[in-house]
């Protein structure tokens, strides 16, 4: 079937594309270009003059031990967020798929967190886990846990991972559930006749068939963890304690807008951009081939 | 030995009953075909035998053991689904061996069985392909292969050929029957195609609205349909029905237009004056030598099938089809006279549709 649309007017297609192109130019290409340009400059502390330094900013950033720490923190953070969000969503979707009554209520409730902005999610977790007034932190203390994420870097990390993943679970859940419900029942019935119990059916039939969806979600979750979790970090830990949750995107903000080191901040965001682009390309190139049927 | 015995089986979804107390015995080695219109409960019955649907009432037993509470895997059955239900992410070999690997059979034994099934089904060249790389007919074979390797006592088929084109369907039909003959198993086969049903079955189970209307050999069902439903469903084109009144003494039936049809049926003696449905198959109608005592019909459509022709027309209020020799000179608009032998007439109760003729 030929899906091509033909226009009678020469300029109509360009006109129709214009808004999207304008948005991309203004909100992506221009800032990205700015960042690229900025990253080769050094400004004086008062912002009165700038000097072209070529790749000096990059050399400076990459040789900074704090930056290397931040890369490690980011790697742990984003892998954990993606893993927690995917696993919990998969589990919930499998349960929701087998629920007979009250399906709609269950599903609706599970989707709600997605409507919550990351910063708000962060504040919610902040209230629940605040060492002095948090409901859950007093529960943890009662259980004998020495809970104070303001001092303990690992606890702070777990908290921001939890808050970020919590939000992403809903999104993943919707995709997993849709994938499971689109799967022909007869496949699982055939497996049941072949002698596979529910657990084995899930891991040998359902899960492999969800791989394309899982892969897509993995990419989305990683990008989410890299960029959009800024609000969570800002609301809960501000990168602390002692840089334990200082992920790259947050460091870009701190160094640029708080530290006012624009050159370094721009260089960092260019590196960040490069990391995410190459991660995504890598994933699509090598992983996707293995998961489509 | 694996005979399948269904006793008073019922199935309800909530308050709606879809199978109403069905009884049937399928002997060991028999090829039973369940046939009926869409929605009559064929798949439901088959899935009850497979254990994929719970039995609401009654019992289903296989090989003398009641199966009601058994898991599908413990029933010694294999099933071929309409959409084949092949695992798309596994190779043909992995598809066929999935159940055997779960049963933890020794590797050489699994390989032997897969090779054997692949040989029977001519799949040897495709063992390392995925289902997505196979044609419809080949996928169908893989589905059969997956059933064969399990070495089951009972094969269950749910419309396995309905996704194939007409030619392949005939070919696969023959292969399935051959396979059944060579394997010493019992088969239960669901279809809504009455040609498939007639050609495959040792025992035909004609279902309608959740009931078994008639169970018998294809020939029995064809020659002695138990109800007007069965008579109309089995045979193509379907049996012609006209209503009439039983005459005095029960030796004739008078049709609308006053035509008297002689019937040789002593059960009718007590029914003088009552309304009955008279059925004659299209292939049992002939052009009458003289209009005397024959059924007049004005032809409104002629279909030439090659070997013979079908003449359509009205008799009284009812549409009648006659299958005539290919050289019969019949055109649209002709007024023809049709006759039939008294022995070819089927009489049914006009209200219940139950057979009156012996
Ligand atoms: N899960 C269900 N819930 C409620 N009713 C159902 C369910 N499954 C089937 N039915 C009903 O049971 C009846 C029999 O369905 P079944 O699938 O057995 O029909 P069938 O004879 O196989 O038809 P077809 O030839 O179209 O496959 C139908 O009227 C259907 O609507
Ligand atoms: Mg069906």
Image (cartoon, rainbow, N blue to C red):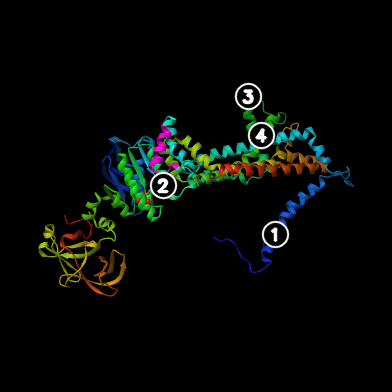
User: Dot 3 surroundings within 10 Å: few (below 14), some, or many (20 or more)?
Assistant: few
Q: Which residue is mark 3?
A: A144
Q: Nearer the viewer, residue B52 or B295?
A: B295
Count of marks overlaid on the render: 4
Q: Which residue is mark 2?
A: B140
Name the chain under label 1: A
Q: Is residue A140 left or right of residue B98?
A: right
Q: Which residue is mark 1?
A: A19
Name the chain under label 4: A
Q: Name which residue lies at 89% across and 43% down.
A: A44
From the image, state whether disc 3 or disc 2 is nearer to you. 2
Magenta segment includes B316:
no
Name the chain under label 3: A
Where are the magenta residues, as a range? Answer: B109-124
Quadrant of the drawing holding the C terminus of chain B: bottom left
Separation of disc 4 and disc 1 at Cα? 40 Å
Residue A86: image x %, image y %? 59, 39
Q: Name which residue lies at 35% across and 43% down.
A: B156
From the image, state whether disc 4 or disc 3 is nearer to you. 4
Q: Which residue is mark 4?
A: A159
Separation of disc 3 and disc 1 at Cα? 57 Å
- Is most of the magenta stretch helix, strand or loop? helix
């Amino acid at each position: 079937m030929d899906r091509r649309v033909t226009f009678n007017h020469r300029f109509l297609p360009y006109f129709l594309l214009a808004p999207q192109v304008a948005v991309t130019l203004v909100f992506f290409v221009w800032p990205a270009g700015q960042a690229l340009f900025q990253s080769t400059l050094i400004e004086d502390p008062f912002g009165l003059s700038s000097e072209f330094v070529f790749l000096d900013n990059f050399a400076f950033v990459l040789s900074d031990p704090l930056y290397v720490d931040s890369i490690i923190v980011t790697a742990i953070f984003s892998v954990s967020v993606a893993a927690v969000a995917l696993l919990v969503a998969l589990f919930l979707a499998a349960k929701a798929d087998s629920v007979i009554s009250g399906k709609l209520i269950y599903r609706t409730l599970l989707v709600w967190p997605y409507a919550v902005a990351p910063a708000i999610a962060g504040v919610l977790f902040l209230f629940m886990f605040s060492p002095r007034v948090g409901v859950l932190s007093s529960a943890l203390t009662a259980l004998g846990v020495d809970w104070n994420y303001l001092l303990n870097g690992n606890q702070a990390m777990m908290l921001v991972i939890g808050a970020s993943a919590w939000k992403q679970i809903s999104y993943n859940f919707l995709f997993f559930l849709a994938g499971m419900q689109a799967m022909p029942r007869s496949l699982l019935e055939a497996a049941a006749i072949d002698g596979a119990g529910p657990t084995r059916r899930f891991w040998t039939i359902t899960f492999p068939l969800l791989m394309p969806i899982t892969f897509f979600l993995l990419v989305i979750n990683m990008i989410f963890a890299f960029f959009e979790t800024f609000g969570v970090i800002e609301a809960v830990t501000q990168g602390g304690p002692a840089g334990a949750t200082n992920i790259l995107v947050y460091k870009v903000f701190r160094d640029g807008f708080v530290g006012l080191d624009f050159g370094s901040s721009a260089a960092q965001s260019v590196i960040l951009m490069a990391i995410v682009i190459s991660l995504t390309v890598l994933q699509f190139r090598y992983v996707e081939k293995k998961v489509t049927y | 030995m694996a005979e399948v015995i269904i006793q008073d089986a019922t199935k309800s979804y909530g308050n709606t009953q879809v199978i109403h107390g069905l009884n049937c015995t399928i002997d060991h080695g028999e090829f039973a075909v369940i046939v009926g219109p869409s929605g009559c409960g064929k798949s439901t019955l088959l899935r009850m035998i497979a254990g994929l649907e719970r039995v609401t009432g009654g019992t289903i037993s296989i090989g003398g053991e009641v199966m009601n509470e058994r898991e599908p895997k413990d029933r010694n059955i294999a099933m071929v689904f309409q959409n084949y239900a092949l695992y798309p992410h596994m190779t043909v070999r992995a598809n066929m061996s999935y159940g055997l690997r779960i049963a933890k059979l020794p590797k050489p034994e699994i390989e032997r069985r897969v090779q054997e099934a692949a040989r029977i089904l001519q799949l040897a060249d495709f063992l390392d392909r995925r289902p997505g790389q196979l044609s419809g007919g080949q996928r169908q074979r893989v589905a059969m292969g997956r059933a064969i390797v399990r070495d089951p006592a009972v094969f269950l088929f749910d419309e396995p050929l309905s996704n194939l084109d007409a030619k392949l369907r005939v070919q696969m039909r023959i292969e399935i029957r051959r396979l059944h003959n060579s394997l010493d198993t019992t088969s239960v086969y669901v279809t809504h195609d009455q040609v498939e049903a007639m050609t495959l079955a040792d025992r035909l189970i004609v279902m309608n609205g959740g009931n078994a209307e008639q169970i018998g050999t294809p020939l029995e069902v064809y020659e002695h349909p138990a109800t007007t439903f069965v008579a109309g469903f089995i045979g193509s084109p379907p049996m012609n029905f006209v209503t009439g009144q039983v005459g005095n003494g029960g030796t004739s039936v008078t049709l609308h237009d006053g035509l008297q049809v002689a019937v040789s049926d002593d059960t009718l003696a007590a029914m003088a004056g009552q309304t009955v449905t008279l059925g004659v198959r299209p292939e049992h109608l002939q052009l009458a030598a003289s209009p005397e005592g024959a059924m007049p019909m004005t032809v409104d459509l002629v279909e030439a099938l090659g070997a013979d022709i079908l003449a359509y027309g009205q008799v009284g209020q009812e549409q009648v089809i006659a299958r005539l020799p290919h050289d019969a000179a019949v055109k649209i608009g002709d007024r023809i006279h049709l006759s039939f032998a008294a022995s070819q007439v089927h009489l049914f109760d006009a209200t219940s549709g139950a057979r009156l003729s012996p």
